[in-house]
Image (cartoon, coloured by chain):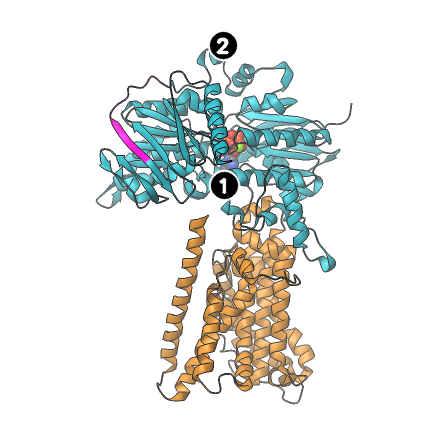
Chain colours: A cyan, B orange
Amino acid sequence: MALPLLTAKSIDKAFSGVAALTSAELQIEGGEVHGLIGQNGAGKSTLIKIITGVYRRDAGTVEFDGGEASFINPREAQSAGIATIYQELNLVPLRSVTENIVMGNEPRKWGGLIDWKTANSQTKKVLSDFGLDLDVERPLGEYSTAIQQLVAIARAVSLNAKLVIMDEPTSSLDDKEVAVLFGVIRQLKQTGVSVLYVSHFLDELFEVCDRVTVMRDGQTIGCHQIAETDKFELIAEMLGRNIEDIKSAGMTDFGGGEAKRGEVLLQADNIGTDNRLRAFSATVHRGEIVGLGGLLGSGRTEAALALFGVDQLTQGRMVFKGEGFEPDDPVTAIRSGLGLLSEDRKAEGIIPDMSVRENLTLALLPRLTRAGQIQRGREREIVENFVKALGIKTADIDQPIRELSGGNQQKVLLARWLATEPDLLILDEPTRGVDVGAKLEIQSIIREYVDRGCGVILISSEFEELVEGADRIVVLQDGYSVSELENPGISEDILIAAIAHHHDEVSGANA
Amino acid sequence: MLDDSAFDLRKYLNNNGQSAGVWIALVALIIFGLLRYDNFGSAYNIVSFLNYNSMFILIAIGMCFVIMTGGIDLSVGSVAAFTSVCAAYLSPFGIEVALPGGVLAGAVIGGINAFVIIVMRVPPFIATLATMLGAKGGALVISGAQTISVDWSSNFTKFGMEKAFGILPWTIVATLVVFFIAWIVLERTPLGRSVLAIGGSEEASTLMGLKVNRAKAFVYIFSGACAGLAGVFLASSYGAGQPLEGIGWELSAIASVVVGGTLLTGGLGSIPATLAGALLLGLVFNILNFENGKGTISLSAYWQLVIRGGFLFVVILLQTRVIRKRQAVS
Ligand SMILES: Nc1ncnc2c1ncn2[C@@H]1O[C@H](COP(=O)(O)OP(=O)(O)OP(=O)(O)O)[C@@H](O)[C@H]1O
Ligand SMILES: [Mg+2]
């Protein structure tokens, strides 16, 4: 049998004394799609960063392509044939799409000058494999998170690597885009390229992976042929629990449709903005989770931005808590009792150098201040409660948030909003990058939250989360709210049908 | 971009986060000057204006590169003073020696900046503040705090005072050369694009596998070399090495860069717009001089500074409004 393409053996890594990896192992064969799973903070991203030269390992060996591999920076790993999409997107939003794709190996002409014409057309070609047709000279930051993620993937694929590493590549993608990505992965595999695929979506693994490695608490727990294992075994291994317990618990746990519906909290009537929201109507009662369903670009996020005062209304009206409501900006919206957990955690959410504590209580400070002094005791108490309730994995609450794993950062953000106790909380992809175990916890926390008489608007690209979590689902299409489904009784098929049905109808009407 | 026959200025500016504001202001000011003052458009005024401002243009170009990485170089004024003294001492050997010598001296100080910032990880503001003081001290020490007169018998002063082939002063020719090289490097080389990428996100640039340290070293050395060349201009044009010159030059350079629409946090910027910014700032002084000359008003140098400051403020205000609009769109 041929040598494996990559072998990482007994890798140790500690961050200022706290172990992140203890003798972790990973082996990837040539031409194989290899899954890597584990809870938030299990060490997946750290292992990837050690392999690709971002971090130095404390102990262990890495072999790649038949030789010992101790890359001292990502560039060396890249030239050796490893292309990586890191979890926190490694792109430059201010620069053009083309630059983000070709940087590091720009097409040249005479004198070594960059040939922009070729660069642009190369970029267009690479992107067309992903079904994207963009103005490649525009700054990347003007495009949505999903498109940015696809661009990152396209960049990695275009590097002609022997191994492509993808750390949670699908976290911002909808089903259609995931399907496109899988097509690309299969194509890579056919040409003999290996793929390391990190994801919290186990179904995805079963679709594309050949083998899967499970990590827990910085250790490699097991490696399975995907055909010889099942979801329950993987979850049990990830969480370190009994298979039987997992089977009885069920996968998602909002318990949608059981809510006692209170008075009307928010009513939006045909609201529209300049930002692709045409006519959106919805009602949210106290004690209720209302989901927004639809494809990417259907206006879900834009609806949230309108409610939150980021985008100004050009039409329609809103009533919030019995009064007419038209916030000029987020500050007014927050004051009136609204909260928005945005989908773009890096740009709008976390402040990387601040501690977990500071990030968590940022929106809360006015209320924690007595006579100009922050009440440290109460602050700690609140933070520690949330860290425990959400299972945030952090060395201590004063650790800078950038040192937390991706999923744990997401939990801190969610905690920030829960702590301010808004009457209506809008959650845009609240469980992005969160592991299955924590997802359950977050979902039950959201349910508890509405049970106390608040309302939640839930936006999610995961149909399962919507179907099982929301009491009602408003389906959006091209900026219009087109139908409403009520739980109990919604299934994934019904939701997909609702989205697709209206899609045809709308495009039919336009034709 | 330079050799594309259909060079679209608006698209270029737009894609670089620039507004046409600085160009409009520049043209407006030139038209104003032409209409109001008789000799404003004279060859003499144009040439002496460009000659005088070439030092500031050079420094602004160097500064632009540094700022595009998200850094800052406060040492440029002192470096120019220092290299003007070096060049004055080297002047007996002719411009062939004094010019490279001055540039090299500036590049060495830039190299020190780069080392301290990249290897010792000192923030650019602090590192270049230290070399600013150090270069100033160095200039005073080697000159004995005196202006150092140049050797008039060599060809050294010809560079600052005579015209190349009888058409344009050598200083302007040299500045144009630097300008075009800088423009090509920024727009057409991986190095230039890395500079912008680093300013956009240094972490992402590292993860993308760009040569981050090399690009950062380049900008500080280049900025030092530009300041070094400006120092040579200074000595050659005024016939003396001047250890006390250069005070506040770094701030004018930063102002030119910012007026040109380059983002102070890095990631967006343009060399032509920086040139326009430097010309604009110089032009305000030029026009105030003409106004004084007309005798309608009489402004002291202090008032000129105040007016220039106010003007700067207005232009920057316009620029940021444009940038904010852009961000609102995205
Ligand atoms: N730069 C750092 N400094 C300190 N601690 C770190 C750093 N990077 C990671 N850690 C810690 O190492 C552990 C593993 O983190 P890692 O990011 O590898 O997890 P992960 O498996 O990728 O999780 P997720 O699914 O949430 O992305 C975490 O406890 C994290 O807090
Ligand atoms: Mg991770």
Q: Is residue A71 visible?
A: no
Label 2: which secondary element = helix
Q: Which residues are magenta?
A: A257-269
Tell me which label, 2 or 1, sits earlier in the chain: 1
In the rendered view, tell whether residue A338 sits above or below residue B147: above
Residue at mark 2 to residue at mark 1: CA–CA distance: 41 Å
Location of mark 1 (residue):
A144
Amino acid, disc 1: Ser
Q: Nearer the viewer, residue B179 or A123?
A: A123
- Asked whether A299 or A255 is in front, the reply is A299
Kindly identify which chain the residue marked by label 1 belongs to. A
As drawn, the label of residue A244 is 2
List x then y, in percent, for residue A444: 38, 22
Identify the residue at horizontal 61%, vertical 25% (top origin).
A35
Kindly indicate the quadrant of the structure image that contains residue A51: top right
Give me the residue at 60% from left, 29% from top: A197
Circle 2 packing at 10 Å, graded few (<14), some (14-19), many (20+), is: few
Residue A418: x %, y % from top left:
33, 32
Say whether residue B244 is magenta: no
For image coordinates 41% across by 69% down, the residue present is B312
- The image quadrant of residue A4 is top right
Residue type for callout 2: Glu
Q: Position of residue A254 (x, y in %)?
A: 39, 20
Quadrant in the picture for the N terminus of chain A: top right
